[in-house]
Each structure stands twice: as C-alpha cells, then as structure tokens.
Image (cartoon, helix red, strand yellow):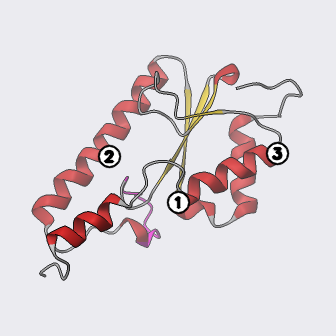
Amino acid sequence: MVDKLSATRRSVNMSKIRSRDTKPELVVRRMLHRLGYRYAVHVKGLAGKPDLVFTARRKVIFVHGCFWHQHDRADCSDARRPKSNTNYWTPKLDRNVERDAQHIASLQKDGWEVFTIWDCETVDEELLRKRLVGFLGAQRVTDRC
C-alpha cells in the first residue's frame, strides 16, 4: 500500500508525536498526585528515563504507548503493526521492544522495581488506581520523590 501523504507531510505528522507528557502519562500522573504520591519525571540519570520515579521507594513507572512499544496483549488492537512499509516498521518496532527490555534489566540490576502501564490500560481508571496502589504500596505522609 502506498503512503497517501507526501514525505514532507508525513514528516510533519510524525514530528508532532510526543515522547513525553503524553495523554496516558498525564492521566497516570494526575491520578497519582490526587492519591498523594509524589514523584520525579523523566530522570536523565536512569536507564530509559522512566516517566515516573519514586526515589525513596526505589520504584519507577514507564507509561508506554501500545503501538510504539508493541503491547503484546492479544486484545490490544493498538499494537498492530503496519501492513505497509514493513521493511521500515518491523526492525524499528523490534528495536523499541529490545531497548525497553534492556532498560528494564538495567534498572532491576541497579535495584529498582519497574512497573509498566500501557496506553490501553489507562481507560479503566478504577483498575488503574488499584494497580498503581498495589505497586507503590501505602502512601507516606512525608513521601518525597
């Protein structure tokens, strides 16, 4: 299938895809803040620059887009690979998955607990809240990043 957009227009469209402060990430951040948790965002010194870092707890959260990070859950339709230009997309998406695995392994080796939230999982807020509280544990009154 041929791309219906010109190379210039495709470039403009792709440049607008955010790598941080995405809608799913903001949903998670707002929920955690409402629940009383405090965190740092995109800490550069950690592998993969996790979206949320809880330094005192030694825990990090990645909020992954289902397409870009290839969510492997069978009922997630957002993770489908493009049928066109597969010579480009297959290696690119495979590299993303491999890089994610390397970042997680590196963080775990350094003593961090890692939790991944997928874009499609941010829709059910009650389930999301339960999963986040389950991962982070009870909030602390004096909790600081």
Taking depth in this image into account, of 71 and 32 the one nearest to the observer is: 32
Mark 2 / mark 3, whichever is N-terminal: 3
Secondary element type, mark 2: helix
Residue occupied by mark 3? 35
Verify whether residue 23 appears in magenta: no
Residue occupied by mark 1? 119
Residue 18 point in image, percent of width and height: 43, 55
The amino acid type of the residue labelled 2 equals: Val
Secondary element type, mark 3: loop
> Which residue corresponds to the image point at 55% horizontal and 23% vertical from the top-left?
112
Mark 1 / mark 3, whichever is N-terminal: 3
In the picture provided, is 68 more to the left or to the right than 45?
left
Taking depth in this image into account, of 68 and 3 the one nearest to the observer is: 3
Residue occupied by mark 2? 97
CB under 8 Å between discs 1 and 3: no
The amino acid type of the residue labelled 1 equals: Asp
> Which residue corresponds to the image point at 18% horizontal and 68% vertical from the top-left?
8
Q: CA distance from mark 2 to mark 3?
A: 31 Å
Q: CA distance from mark 1 to mark 3?
A: 20 Å
The amino acid type of the residue labelled 3 equals: Leu
